[in-house]
Amino acid sequence: MAKKTVGQIDVRSKRVLVRVDFNVPLGEDGRVTDDRRVRQALPTIRSVVEGGGRCVLMSHLGRPKGDGPDARFSLALVARRLSGLVGKPVRMAPDCVGPEVSGQVAGLKDGEVCLLENLRFHPAETIKDKDAALDPELKERKLAFARKLAELADVYVNDAFGTCHRDNASMLTVPQLMSGKPRVVGFLVEKELKFLGDALRRPARPFVVLLGGAKVSDKIPLIDALVERCDAILIGGAMAYTFLRADGLSVGDSLVEPERMEEARRIRQAAGAKLHLPLDSVTAEQLKAGTLTTVCERAIPTGRAGYDIGPQTVRAYTELIAGARTIFWNGPMGVFETPPFDAGTLAVARAVADATEDGAVSIIGGGDSAAAVDAAGLDERMTHISTGGGAALEFLEGKPFAAIEVLDEA
Ligand code: ADP
Ligand code: MG
């Protein structure tokens, strides 16, 4: 069932509380190093502004410790960046709740925007419902905090997909308390649900899944969830070595998770011929940019480790990708941060982009995979790059998201 979106409601003169994900990376000097997340929230913000709503934005940023404000995690810098992007001043609130904030929100005119200060300056934001269920005092703290946020608004919008797998006060308790008022998804969440939900649950076939990255352990539930639905799983990255090792192959000093070998065997059994492992690896004695490399077919001698998929693997995977109608990719094929071990990831990224041009739906999930696609300048050529991170993976695993379920149906 589809969720009602911010585009389907009348926001004129209403106070619209929008949960966004402005958890942007900050540089050493505290400046915003990548404003993708801010830019991605723009369609929703513009829709509220253009509809004559009074836009009240809230987000978390980083992991501030303890109670109260902490300048290193202030959203004020984001407010400035956002002003430039929306082309109008964004008022920065001194906190996210309290009399001063209420006053500021009450003073907003139609079409104006304000940004509340970091939600995580209040530890109540991240109290888990399962802990609150055991402790009445915790429960009351979370409720009291959420009540103050809920009182700021006439409409609730969730546009923070990356946090949708959590039961934070701003994500779940606030919309629960706003029952009877419109509670909708923003355009970013709508898009994530469309691609991660519909496209991957009822994929056009062949459906090819590319999985890489460092650890198998992170991806086991994902593999289990996708194996039935897909036609091929192409494994790369360090996690390939746990599978190869479980097959009895020597993988030298490559990263393996010995405690996951049993699980790897089980997955291999279940996936059968769908599961593809690298045919060769680019190996080196040490992980260093520009280091001397050797391509090893399957077995890797001691003293060397595999840091990327090899050319034969690239060819085989490229062919399978070219024939796909739906592609989901999570996790780089090698240590793409350190050239020349970026070659496999880049080649695969190009193959996915080409397949997309030929009509396939391509969905990229995972922070590092998205970074690799960006670095290759291929982001515009993919169908969808998920902002979800951990949330996207949990969603694909089929876990229910209470923060989405609470919102109105279209
Ligand atoms: P994503 O963020 O896309 O979900 P992961 O976080 O699972 O991806 O994995 C990314 C990390 O995996 C990268 O830092 C990359 O260097 C590492 N990695 C990939 N291949 C290897 C390898 N062969 N050996 C060691 N690390 C690897
Ligand atoms: Mg990662």
Image: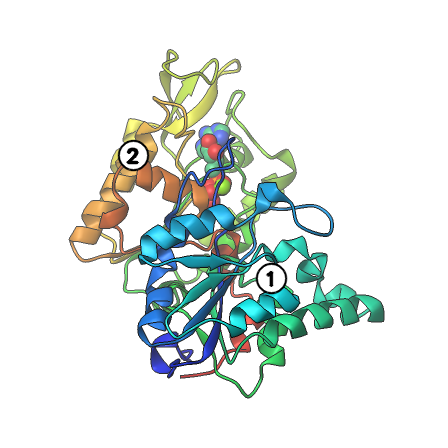
- What's the amino acid at mark 1? Cys
Residue 279: in sight, yes or no?
Answer: yes
Q: Are marks 2 and 1 in contact (CB under 8 Å)?
A: no
Q: Residues within 10 Å of mark 1 (few under 14, many from 20)?
A: many
Residue for badge 1: 96
Above or below, comparing residue 278 to residue 396 in the picture? above
* Furthest residue toward bottom: 180
* Mark drawn on residue 346: 2
Mark pair 2, 1: CA separation: 42 Å
At 41% from the left and 31% from the top, the residue drawn is 334
Above or below, comparing residue 281 to residue 5 in the picture? above
At 60% from the left and 75% from the top, the residue drawn is 150
Give whichever of 311, 218 is nearer the camera.
218
At 61% from the left and 78% from the top, the residue drawn is 176
**Could you say where residue 325 lies in the image, as x and y percent from the top left?**
24, 58
Helix, strand or loop at label 2? It is helix
Q: Nearer the viewer, mark 2 or mark 1?
A: 1
Left or right of 197 in this view: 311:
left
Name the image quarter holding residue 159: bottom left
Q: Is mark 1 within 8 Å of ligand 2?
A: no
- What's the amino acid at mark 2? Leu
Residue 160: in sight, yes or no?
Answer: no
Looking at the rendering, in which quadrant would you find the C terminus?
bottom left
**Could you say where residue 344 lies in the image, as x and y percent from the top left?**
32, 32
Q: Residues within 10 Å of mark 2 (few under 14, many from 20)?
A: many
Helix, strand or loop at label 1? It is loop
Give whichever of 298, 315 is nearer the camera.
315
**Could you say where residue 67 lies in the image, as x and y percent from the top left?**
73, 52
Give whichever of 407, 390 is nearer the camera.
407
Looking at the rendering, in which quadrant would you find the N terminus?
bottom left
